Amino acid sequence: ARPRVGYYHTGKKPTELIAGIIGNIRVADVQSRPIVIRETCSVYDAIVAIFTEDVGTIVVVSDGGFIEGIISRKDLLKAAMGGKNINELPVTLAMTRMPNIILAAADEPILRAAKKLISHQVDSLPVVEMATVDQIEKFKVVGRITKTNITQLFVNLADS
Amino acid sequence: ARPRVGYYHTGKKPTELIAGIIGNIRVADVQSRPIVIRETCSVYDAIVAIFTEDVGTIVVVSDGGFIEGIISRKDLLKAAMGGKNINELPVTLAMTRMPNIILAAADEPILRAAKKLISHQVDSLPVVEMATVDQIEKFKVVGRITKTNITQLFVNLADS
Protein backbone atom coordinates (compact mmCIF):
# COMPACT_ATOMS: atom_id res chain seq x y z
CA ALA A 1 0.00 0.00 0.00
CA ARG A 2 1.26 3.44 -0.84
CA PRO A 3 1.54 6.10 1.84
CA ARG A 4 -1.43 8.44 1.65
CA VAL A 5 -0.68 11.24 4.08
CA GLY A 6 1.16 14.14 2.51
CA TYR A 7 1.39 12.47 -0.87
CA TYR A 8 -0.11 13.64 -4.12
CA HIS A 9 0.21 11.51 -7.18
CA THR A 10 -1.76 13.49 -9.65
CA GLY A 11 0.98 13.50 -12.28
CA LYS A 12 0.58 17.25 -12.34
CA LYS A 13 3.01 20.09 -11.74
CA PRO A 14 2.04 22.69 -9.11
CA THR A 15 1.24 25.17 -11.89
CA GLU A 16 -1.11 22.61 -13.41
CA LEU A 17 -2.84 22.28 -10.05
CA ILE A 18 -3.33 26.06 -10.02
CA ALA A 19 -4.78 25.91 -13.53
CA GLY A 20 -7.09 23.11 -12.39
CA ILE A 21 -8.38 25.02 -9.37
CA ILE A 22 -8.89 28.26 -11.30
CA GLY A 23 -10.50 26.32 -14.17
CA ASN A 24 -13.38 25.34 -11.88
CA ILE A 25 -14.27 28.92 -10.92
CA ARG A 26 -17.10 30.56 -12.86
CA VAL A 27 -18.08 34.21 -13.33
CA ALA A 28 -21.17 33.70 -11.12
CA ASP A 29 -18.89 32.64 -8.21
CA VAL A 30 -17.17 36.04 -7.98
CA GLN A 31 -19.35 38.61 -9.77
CA SER A 32 -20.69 41.80 -8.17
CA ARG A 33 -24.22 43.13 -8.45
CA PRO A 34 -24.91 45.20 -11.57
CA ILE A 35 -24.95 49.01 -11.37
CA VAL A 36 -27.32 50.41 -13.98
CA ILE A 37 -29.01 53.62 -15.07
CA ARG A 38 -31.89 54.13 -17.52
CA GLU A 39 -31.17 55.19 -21.07
CA THR A 40 -33.35 58.27 -20.54
CA CYS A 41 -30.79 59.73 -18.07
CA SER A 42 -28.48 62.67 -18.72
CA VAL A 43 -24.68 62.68 -18.54
CA TYR A 44 -25.09 64.59 -15.27
CA ASP A 45 -27.27 61.77 -13.85
CA ALA A 46 -24.58 59.26 -14.85
CA ILE A 47 -21.86 61.29 -13.10
CA VAL A 48 -23.96 61.44 -9.92
CA ALA A 49 -24.55 57.66 -10.12
CA ILE A 50 -20.85 56.86 -10.69
CA PHE A 51 -19.92 58.86 -7.58
CA THR A 52 -22.81 57.55 -5.47
CA GLU A 53 -22.10 53.92 -6.35
CA ASP A 54 -18.31 54.47 -6.45
CA VAL A 55 -17.81 52.32 -9.54
CA GLY A 56 -15.71 52.82 -12.66
CA THR A 57 -18.37 51.85 -15.20
CA ILE A 58 -22.19 51.95 -15.27
CA VAL A 59 -24.45 49.96 -17.57
CA VAL A 60 -27.15 51.87 -19.44
CA VAL A 61 -30.36 49.83 -19.76
CA SER A 62 -33.73 50.02 -21.49
CA ASP A 63 -37.09 48.90 -20.06
CA GLY A 64 -36.76 45.41 -18.62
CA GLY A 65 -33.09 45.82 -17.71
CA PHE A 66 -31.66 45.05 -21.16
CA ILE A 67 -28.21 46.45 -21.94
CA GLU A 68 -28.04 49.34 -24.41
CA GLY A 69 -24.60 50.73 -23.55
CA ILE A 70 -21.94 51.31 -20.92
CA ILE A 71 -20.41 54.54 -19.68
CA SER A 72 -17.10 54.85 -17.83
CA ARG A 73 -15.40 57.57 -15.76
CA LYS A 74 -13.27 58.19 -18.84
CA ASP A 75 -16.33 58.69 -21.08
CA LEU A 76 -17.87 61.00 -18.48
CA LEU A 77 -14.67 63.03 -18.07
CA LYS A 78 -14.55 63.46 -21.85
CA ALA A 79 -18.23 64.52 -21.90
CA ALA A 80 -17.72 66.95 -18.98
CA MET A 81 -14.80 68.53 -20.89
CA GLY A 82 -16.88 68.91 -24.05
CA GLY A 83 -18.28 72.30 -23.12
CA LYS A 84 -21.92 71.22 -23.46
CA ASN A 85 -24.62 71.40 -20.80
CA ILE A 86 -24.29 67.96 -19.23
CA ASN A 87 -27.72 68.30 -17.61
CA GLU A 88 -29.29 68.25 -21.03
CA LEU A 89 -26.82 65.92 -22.75
CA PRO A 90 -28.38 62.41 -23.02
CA VAL A 91 -26.18 59.64 -21.63
CA THR A 92 -26.87 57.74 -24.87
CA LEU A 93 -24.71 60.30 -26.74
CA ALA A 94 -21.66 59.70 -24.51
CA MET A 95 -21.88 55.93 -23.92
CA THR A 96 -20.35 52.99 -25.78
CA ARG A 97 -23.21 51.20 -27.53
CA MET A 98 -24.07 47.59 -28.16
CA PRO A 99 -22.75 45.62 -30.01
CA ASN A 100 -19.38 47.25 -29.19
CA ILE A 101 -19.41 46.04 -25.60
CA ILE A 102 -17.48 43.04 -24.28
CA LEU A 103 -19.87 40.83 -22.26
CA ALA A 104 -19.56 37.86 -19.91
CA ALA A 105 -21.96 35.03 -19.06
CA ALA A 106 -22.59 33.83 -15.50
CA ASP A 107 -21.49 30.25 -16.30
CA GLU A 108 -18.35 31.31 -18.19
CA PRO A 109 -14.98 30.32 -16.65
CA ILE A 110 -13.56 33.27 -14.68
CA LEU A 111 -10.22 32.82 -16.49
CA ARG A 112 -11.91 33.58 -19.81
CA ALA A 113 -13.49 36.73 -18.35
CA ALA A 114 -10.11 37.80 -16.90
CA LYS A 115 -8.52 37.36 -20.33
CA LYS A 116 -11.24 39.54 -21.89
CA LEU A 117 -10.51 42.31 -19.33
CA ILE A 118 -6.83 42.21 -20.34
CA SER A 119 -7.11 41.77 -24.10
CA HIS A 120 -9.85 44.39 -24.57
CA GLN A 121 -8.28 46.77 -22.04
CA VAL A 122 -11.49 47.33 -20.08
CA ASP A 123 -12.00 47.51 -16.31
CA SER A 124 -15.41 45.86 -16.19
CA LEU A 125 -17.60 43.38 -18.09
CA PRO A 126 -21.40 43.35 -17.80
CA VAL A 127 -22.63 39.84 -16.94
CA VAL A 128 -25.71 39.08 -19.03
CA GLU A 129 -28.35 36.47 -19.81
CA MET A 130 -29.69 36.16 -23.32
CA ALA A 131 -33.44 36.67 -23.78
CA THR A 132 -35.60 36.83 -26.88
CA VAL A 133 -38.08 39.71 -26.89
CA ASP A 134 -40.39 40.09 -29.89
CA GLN A 135 -38.04 37.81 -31.83
CA ILE A 136 -35.08 40.09 -31.09
CA GLU A 137 -32.14 38.79 -29.04
CA LYS A 138 -31.48 40.97 -26.02
CA PHE A 139 -29.13 40.76 -23.07
CA LYS A 140 -30.48 41.16 -19.56
CA VAL A 141 -27.92 42.55 -17.10
CA VAL A 142 -27.46 40.25 -14.09
CA GLY A 143 -24.06 41.27 -12.69
CA ARG A 144 -20.62 42.71 -13.39
CA ILE A 145 -17.07 41.38 -13.35
CA THR A 146 -14.26 43.84 -12.66
CA LYS A 147 -10.51 43.78 -12.10
CA THR A 148 -11.40 44.29 -8.43
CA ASN A 149 -13.21 40.90 -8.44
CA ILE A 150 -10.14 39.25 -10.02
CA THR A 151 -7.78 40.93 -7.52
CA GLN A 152 -9.98 39.76 -4.63
CA LEU A 153 -10.02 36.23 -6.08
CA PHE A 154 -6.22 36.30 -6.38
CA VAL A 155 -5.95 37.28 -2.69
CA ASN A 156 -8.44 34.56 -1.67
CA LEU A 157 -6.56 31.88 -3.63
CA ALA A 158 -3.20 32.88 -2.13
CA ASP A 159 -4.63 33.04 1.39
CA SER A 160 -6.65 29.82 1.31
CA ALA B 1 12.58 3.14 -4.29
CA ARG B 2 9.47 5.24 -4.56
CA PRO B 3 8.03 6.01 -7.97
CA ARG B 4 9.07 9.50 -9.04
CA VAL B 5 7.14 10.22 -12.19
CA GLY B 6 3.82 11.89 -11.52
CA TYR B 7 4.22 11.87 -7.75
CA TYR B 8 4.46 14.81 -5.39
CA HIS B 9 5.08 14.25 -1.72
CA THR B 10 5.33 17.75 -0.42
CA GLY B 11 2.78 17.18 2.31
CA LYS B 12 0.99 20.23 0.99
CA LYS B 13 -2.52 20.73 -0.27
CA PRO B 14 -2.94 22.23 -3.75
CA THR B 15 -4.08 25.51 -2.21
CA GLU B 16 -0.87 25.60 -0.16
CA LEU B 17 1.13 25.11 -3.35
CA ILE B 18 -0.67 28.12 -4.84
CA ALA B 19 0.14 30.17 -1.74
CA GLY B 20 3.79 29.07 -2.05
CA ILE B 21 4.09 30.05 -5.69
CA ILE B 22 2.37 33.42 -5.21
CA GLY B 23 4.42 34.05 -2.06
CA ASN B 24 7.60 34.16 -4.14
CA ILE B 25 6.35 36.89 -6.48
CA ARG B 26 7.42 40.46 -5.69
CA VAL B 27 6.01 43.83 -6.77
CA ALA B 28 9.07 44.42 -8.98
CA ASP B 29 8.24 41.25 -10.97
CA VAL B 30 4.92 42.58 -12.24
CA GLN B 31 4.93 46.38 -11.85
CA SER B 32 4.36 48.85 -14.70
CA ARG B 33 6.37 51.97 -15.41
CA PRO B 34 5.33 55.05 -13.41
CA ILE B 35 3.17 57.73 -15.07
CA VAL B 36 3.94 61.11 -13.50
CA ILE B 37 3.28 64.82 -13.96
CA ARG B 38 4.97 67.79 -12.28
CA GLU B 39 3.32 69.48 -9.32
CA THR B 40 3.34 72.76 -11.26
CA CYS B 41 0.77 71.37 -13.75
CA SER B 42 -2.89 72.40 -13.98
CA VAL B 43 -5.92 70.12 -13.66
CA TYR B 44 -6.27 70.49 -17.44
CA ASP B 45 -2.70 69.19 -17.95
CA ALA B 46 -3.54 66.20 -15.72
CA ILE B 47 -6.67 65.41 -17.76
CA VAL B 48 -4.66 65.53 -20.99
CA ALA B 49 -2.02 63.23 -19.43
CA ILE B 50 -4.59 60.73 -18.14
CA PHE B 51 -6.10 60.44 -21.64
CA THR B 52 -2.74 60.38 -23.44
CA GLU B 53 -1.32 57.68 -21.17
CA ASP B 54 -4.70 55.92 -20.78
CA VAL B 55 -4.24 55.25 -17.08
CA GLY B 56 -6.62 55.56 -14.15
CA THR B 57 -4.25 57.39 -11.80
CA ILE B 58 -1.25 59.71 -12.26
CA VAL B 59 1.42 60.48 -9.68
CA VAL B 60 2.24 64.14 -9.04
CA VAL B 61 5.96 64.65 -8.38
CA SER B 62 8.32 67.41 -7.28
CA ASP B 63 11.88 68.02 -8.60
CA GLY B 64 13.82 64.77 -8.54
CA GLY B 65 10.74 62.60 -9.07
CA PHE B 66 9.59 62.50 -5.44
CA ILE B 67 5.91 61.80 -4.82
CA GLU B 68 3.76 64.70 -3.64
CA GLY B 69 0.32 63.38 -4.51
CA ILE B 70 -1.82 61.26 -6.80
CA ILE B 71 -4.76 62.21 -8.96
CA SER B 72 -7.37 59.80 -10.37
CA ARG B 73 -10.05 59.97 -13.07
CA LYS B 74 -12.51 60.34 -10.22
CA ASP B 75 -10.63 63.36 -8.75
CA LEU B 76 -10.41 64.92 -12.22
CA LEU B 77 -14.10 64.35 -12.95
CA LYS B 78 -14.93 66.03 -9.63
CA ALA B 79 -12.61 68.95 -10.47
CA ALA B 80 -14.05 69.28 -13.99
CA MET B 81 -17.56 69.44 -12.48
CA GLY B 82 -16.54 72.15 -10.00
CA GLY B 83 -17.25 75.02 -12.34
CA LYS B 84 -13.75 76.52 -12.08
CA ASN B 85 -11.34 77.21 -14.93
CA ILE B 86 -9.39 73.94 -15.00
CA ASN B 87 -6.64 75.56 -17.06
CA GLU B 88 -5.79 77.75 -14.10
CA LEU B 89 -6.64 75.29 -11.32
CA PRO B 90 -3.37 73.79 -9.94
CA VAL B 91 -3.34 69.98 -9.87
CA THR B 92 -2.12 70.24 -6.27
CA LEU B 93 -5.59 71.54 -5.25
CA ALA B 94 -7.39 68.48 -6.68
CA MET B 95 -4.95 65.68 -5.80
CA THR B 96 -4.72 63.38 -2.78
CA ARG B 97 -1.61 64.42 -0.86
CA MET B 98 1.11 62.57 0.98
CA PRO B 99 0.96 61.08 3.59
CA ASN B 100 -2.60 59.98 2.66
CA ILE B 101 -1.38 57.75 -0.18
CA ILE B 102 -1.02 53.98 0.00
CA LEU B 103 2.44 53.02 -1.31
CA ALA B 104 4.23 49.82 -2.30
CA ALA B 105 7.92 48.86 -2.33
CA ALA B 106 9.58 47.00 -5.21
CA ASP B 107 10.68 44.10 -2.98
CA GLU B 108 7.29 43.75 -1.24
CA PRO B 109 5.36 40.49 -1.85
CA ILE B 110 2.75 41.02 -4.59
CA LEU B 111 0.12 39.44 -2.34
CA ARG B 112 0.59 42.24 0.21
CA ALA B 113 0.22 44.88 -2.53
CA ALA B 114 -2.93 43.12 -3.83
CA LYS B 115 -4.39 43.19 -0.31
CA LYS B 116 -3.69 46.93 -0.06
CA LEU B 117 -5.55 47.52 -3.36
CA ILE B 118 -8.57 45.68 -1.94
CA SER B 119 -8.58 46.96 1.64
CA HIS B 120 -7.97 50.62 0.73
CA GLN B 121 -10.30 50.46 -2.29
CA VAL B 122 -7.78 51.99 -4.71
CA ASP B 123 -7.00 50.97 -8.30
CA SER B 124 -3.28 51.73 -8.22
CA LEU B 125 -0.32 51.95 -5.81
CA PRO B 126 2.78 54.03 -6.56
CA VAL B 127 5.92 51.89 -6.17
CA VAL B 128 8.57 53.95 -4.37
CA GLU B 129 12.11 53.88 -3.00
CA MET B 130 12.91 55.79 0.16
CA ALA B 131 15.58 58.50 -0.09
CA THR B 132 16.82 61.07 2.43
CA VAL B 133 17.11 64.59 1.02
CA ASP B 134 18.35 67.36 3.37
CA GLN B 135 17.54 65.05 6.30
CA ILE B 136 13.93 64.67 5.12
CA GLU B 137 12.61 61.26 4.09
CA LYS B 138 11.20 61.30 0.59
CA PHE B 139 9.81 58.65 -1.74
CA LYS B 140 11.13 58.41 -5.26
CA VAL B 141 8.57 57.00 -7.72
CA VAL B 142 9.93 53.93 -9.55
CA GLY B 143 6.79 52.15 -10.78
CA ARG B 144 3.12 51.44 -10.25
CA ILE B 145 1.03 48.40 -9.34
CA THR B 146 -2.57 48.26 -10.53
CA LYS B 147 -5.47 45.83 -10.55
CA THR B 148 -4.59 45.31 -14.22
CA ASN B 149 -1.16 43.94 -13.15
CA ILE B 150 -2.86 41.57 -10.69
CA THR B 151 -5.42 40.45 -13.31
CA GLN B 152 -2.60 39.80 -15.80
CA LEU B 153 -0.69 37.83 -13.13
CA PHE B 154 -3.83 35.78 -12.40
CA VAL B 155 -4.13 34.93 -16.12
CA ASN B 156 -0.42 34.03 -16.33
CA LEU B 157 -0.63 31.75 -13.27
CA ALA B 158 -3.71 29.97 -14.60
CA ASP B 159 -2.19 29.56 -18.08
CA SER B 160 1.30 28.45 -17.03
Image (cartoon, coloured by chain):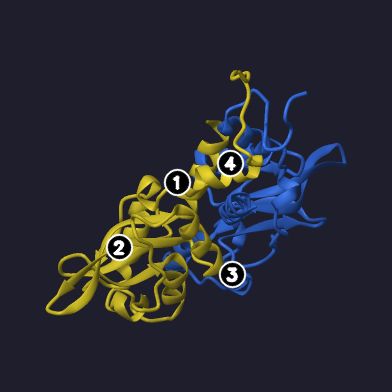
Chain colours: A blue, B yellow
Label 2: state its secondary structure. Answer: strand
Residue under label 1, please give it: B24
Q: How far is disc 4 from disc 2 in space, using C-alphas?
A: 30 Å
Residue at image mark 2:
B128
Location of mark 4 (residue): B17
Q: Amino acid at mark 1?
A: Asn
As measured in the structure, the alpha-carbon distance from the residue carrying label 3 to the one carrying label 4 is 35 Å
Q: Secondary structure at mark 1?
A: loop
Q: Locate residue A63 relative to residue B148 in the image: left or right.
A: right
Give A64 or A1, whichever is nearer the viewer.
A1
Q: Are marks 3 and 1 in contact (CB under 8 Å)?
A: no
Assess disc 3: are there few (<14), some (14-19) or many (≥20) residues with their C-alpha within 10 Å of its C-alpha.
few
N-terminal-most mark, 4 or 2:
4
Q: Nearer the viewer, residue A158 or A1?
A: A1
- Contact? badges 2 and 1 (CB < 8 Å): no
Q: CA distance from mark 2 to mark 1?
A: 20 Å
Please tell me which of labels 2 and 1 falls first in the chain. 1
Frontmost residue, A45 versus B120: B120
Tag 3 residue: A54
Classify mark 1: residues with Cα within 10 Å, few (<14), some (14-19) or many (20+).
few
Residue B4, x across and y down, in percent: 59, 20
* Rendered residue at 23%/73% (across/down): B138
Q: Secondary structure at mark 4?
A: helix
